[in-house]
């Protein structure tokens, strides 16, 4: 398969959150995703299940020849290696969460995999960091740039996405 741009959303709210995100970046790079863009680091309140710790969230962009299914398998493998308990249910606390936000030239609508991510446009905690690395990228179904979709979210919700480290945070000691 030909290489194309992939955009992933990563989050962590258990353990050493920064370390989980840093290690996930290394693992993605080691396994076929040439990550070349990493957003600033944001702290956000939990979404869905509210009684849990705050998340650190980032978005990344890179080149890969993995298709959506292979990317999902890789994401789940990396999440499991970081101790994610898949039996705990959706939207619960986790050391690492990796979602496929967008894949250039590929859309998928299957029971266990939807690309672009089905809730992408409803989540400021994804749209804000994603706009850092893919602000001009068009949503394939809506034909609107990610930055414009971010700006449609309520201001109060966007204000809850707090930048805690600038672009390049993953290289700092």
Image (cartoon, helix red, strand yellow):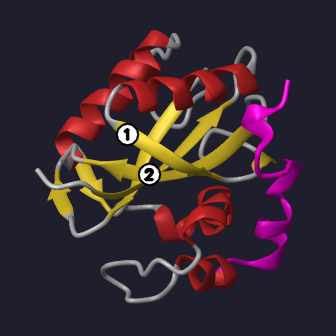
Q: In this view, does 77 lie above or below 100?
A: above
Where residue 139 sits: x, y (%)?
Answer: 40, 78
Mark 2 burial class by Cα count in 10 Å: few <14, some 14-19, many 20+: many
Point out which mark residue 62 bears.
Answer: 2
Where residue 86 sits: x, y (%)?
Answer: 40, 20
> Which residue is more in the foreground, 5 or 113?
5
Where residue 77 sits: x, y (%)?
Answer: 34, 20
Residue at 44 percent of width and 32 percent of height: 29
Could you tell whether 85 is left or right of 125 in the image? left
Could you tell whether 59 is left or right of 138 in the image? right
Q: Which of marks 2 and 1 is nearer the N terminus?
A: 1
Q: In this view, does 27 lie above or below 135?
A: above
Q: What's the magenta region?
A: 153-173
Residue on which disc 1 sits: 33
Q: Dot 1: what SS?
A: strand
Q: Is residue 78 above or below residue 69?
A: above
What is the C-alpha distance between the residues marked 2 and 1?
6 Å
Can residue 47 be seen in this snapshot? no
Number of residue marks: 2
């Amino acid at each position: 398969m030909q290489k194309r741009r992939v955009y992933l959303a990563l989050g962590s709210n258990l353990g050493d959150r920064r370390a989980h995100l840093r290690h996930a970046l290394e693992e993605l790079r080691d396994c076929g995703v040439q990550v070349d863009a990493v957003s600033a680091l944001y702290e956000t309140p939990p979404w869905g299940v509210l009684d849990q710790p705050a998340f650190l969230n980032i978005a990344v962009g890179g080149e890969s020849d993995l298709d959506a299914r292979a990317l999902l398998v890789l994401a789940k493998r990396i999440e499991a290696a970081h101790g994610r308990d898949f039996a705990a249910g959706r939207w619960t606390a986790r050391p690492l969460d990796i979602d496929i936000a967008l894949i250039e030239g590929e859309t998928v609508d299957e029971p266990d995999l939807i690309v672009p991510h089905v809730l992408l446009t409803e989540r400021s905690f994804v749209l804000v960091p994603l706009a850092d690395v893919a602000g001009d990228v068009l949503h394939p179904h809506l034909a609107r740039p990610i930055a414009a979709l971010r700006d449609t979210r309520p201001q109060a919700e966007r204000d809850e996405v707090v930048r805690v480290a600038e672009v390049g945070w993953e290289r700092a000691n």
